[in-house]
Each structure stands twice: as C-alpha cells, then as structure tokens.
Image: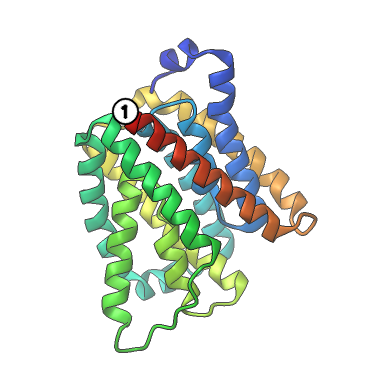
Amino acid sequence: MSLETLQSLPLITLFIAFLGPFLGGLVKGMLGIGLPLVALPFLLLAVDIQSAILLLVGPMLTTNLWQSILDGGVRELAARYWLLLAMVFAGLFIGLQILVGADTATLNIIVGTSLIAMALILWRTPKLTITRRLRVPVEALTGLTAGMLGGVTSLFAPPLITFLAAQRLDKDIFVRHISFLYLICVSILILLLIQKGVMTSAMLVPALIAIGLTHTGLEIGRLLRGRVNGDAFQKAILIVMVLSGLNLLRKALF
C-alpha cells in the first residue's frame, strides 16, 4: 500500500483503516498486550490482508522496542528463548510463503478461521503446566506455530501467551517477556518482508501514520490503566475478533 493508494480510499474507509492502530495502541497501553489482536480486525474492514499486515509491523516494532528498552534484561531473555525464536524464524518463512503465494479467498479463509480460533482459545487461556522433560519440544512447537501464524496474519500472540501462561509468570514479568518476544518476532518478519520485496519505501508514509496513531493510543491507554474493567475490555476485543473472522469467511465463501 502506498500513499497514493491511501489517498484514493473513501474517507470512511480511511478512518476505519487507521482506527485499528489507534485502538490497538489504546489496548496495549491499558493491558500491556493486544495491539495486533485489536488492530487487525479493523484494518481488514478497509484494506486487504497483505496491506493490513504491512501497516501493522511498524507499530508492533516500535511499541515493543519501547517496552523492551524500559524493562531491560534483553540479553537474559535472548538466552532463555533462543530455541523458541529460532523456530519462529522457520515458521515465519513458511507463513510468508503462504501470504505471498495464496489468492485472496484462501487468505480470507485462513485468517478468518485463525481469528475465530484464537479468540476462542484466548477466551479461556488454557492453564497448562510444562514439565522439564517436555519443555524443549513444546517450546519448539510453540515457536513454529507462532511463526506460521505471524507470517500469514501478524498474530504471534496466542501460542506465545499460552506458552508463557504455563510458566506461571508474575504479571509484570509476563508483560516484559511477551514484549521481548514480540519485538524479535516482528523484527524477523520485517526483515523477511524486505527480503521478499513485499515491504518497500512506498510503505513509509502509511507506516509512519500508523505508528503515530498507535503511540497516541498507547499513551492514552496508559493514562486509563486501572480505570477500566480489564476483563470486560478483553472480552470485547475477542468478540471483535470473532465478528471479523466471520466477515472474512463470508467474503471468501459467498
């Protein structure tokens, strides 16, 4: 998507497209997570899947980079999750092959089904316990799954959240770990998008607009943190995901 493409969109479509990054930033500021989960459904109401992902990667990179800088401990986390991140790379390579090669109807089915499935999983995040013996294969499978989902939809979150939840981390530690993992995942995604020629300089202005709106929402969300019922807000997000997924399936099948 280029600046010229944006300028050709109807005003209401343009508003909906950029409402996504703003609301995604708002939720991330309040809850610490949720940027792509919220932003993608709104973006998909206005633009195609590839354009939506290209608009999201900039905000995802800058918000998680900021969070990781604030929290620190990057070297320690890299040593802890090196296997997971290596498998994310492999999964991203597969996911991007699907994103670039599949037709629009197929992508709509994949993303629509993924959104509904992820919403159902996140509605009641499974309370799992990973034994020491199973940690390596579970971590590898988590990374591969997150990478494949991230490559097609930019939604790395559900497998990563489930994996971290199984480790019973303190809330603040959880946010630090998930922000670091997002940062590395999105950085790899951007490099692969550039390497494949999907992300070009034509995306610069739209990406900067999306980044600016996301960070505006992020700061407002931080101010609202603790003043809004977090559980109700998260459930509203998941309902939006389900409705967006059903809409994509409608487009593909009817």
Above-or-below relation of 17 to 26: above
Above-or-below relation of 63 to 195: below
Quarter of the image that includes the N terminus = top left
The residue positioned 29% from the left and 89% from the top of the image is 133
The residue positioned 37% from the left and 49% from the top of the image is 187
The residue positioned 37% from the left and 33% from the top of the image is 49
Nearer to us in this view, 53 or 242 = 242
Q: Position of residue 170 (x, y in %)?
A: 59, 77
Q: Is residue 144 visible?
A: yes
Above-or-below relation of 193 to 48: below
Badge 1 density bin: few <14, some 14–19, many ≥20, Cα 10 Å: some
Above-or-below relation of 107 to 137: above
| Horizontal arrangement in the rendering, residue 108 relative to residue 43 (left or right) | left
Nearer to us in this view, 85 or 237 = 237
The residue positioned 46% from the left and 47% from the top of the image is 61
Q: In which quarter of the image is residue 194?
A: top left
Q: Position of residue 235 (x, y in %)?
A: 62, 55
Label 1: which secondary element = loop
Nearer to us in this view, 221 or 69 = 221
| Horizontal arrangement in the rendering, residue 20 relative to residue 98 (left or right) | right
Residue type marked 1: Thr
Residue that carries the numbered disc 1 in the rendered image:
200
User: Furthest residue to the right?
Assistant: 227
User: Furthest residue to the front?
Assistant: 254
Quarter of the image that includes the C terminus = top left
Q: Can residue 72 be seen in this view?
A: no
Q: Quadrant of residue 136?
A: bottom left
| Horizontal arrangement in the rendering, residue 86 relative to residue 247 (left or right) | left
Q: Position of residue 5 (x, y in %)?
A: 42, 15
Q: Where is residue 222 in the image (x, y as percent from the top left)?
A: 71, 52
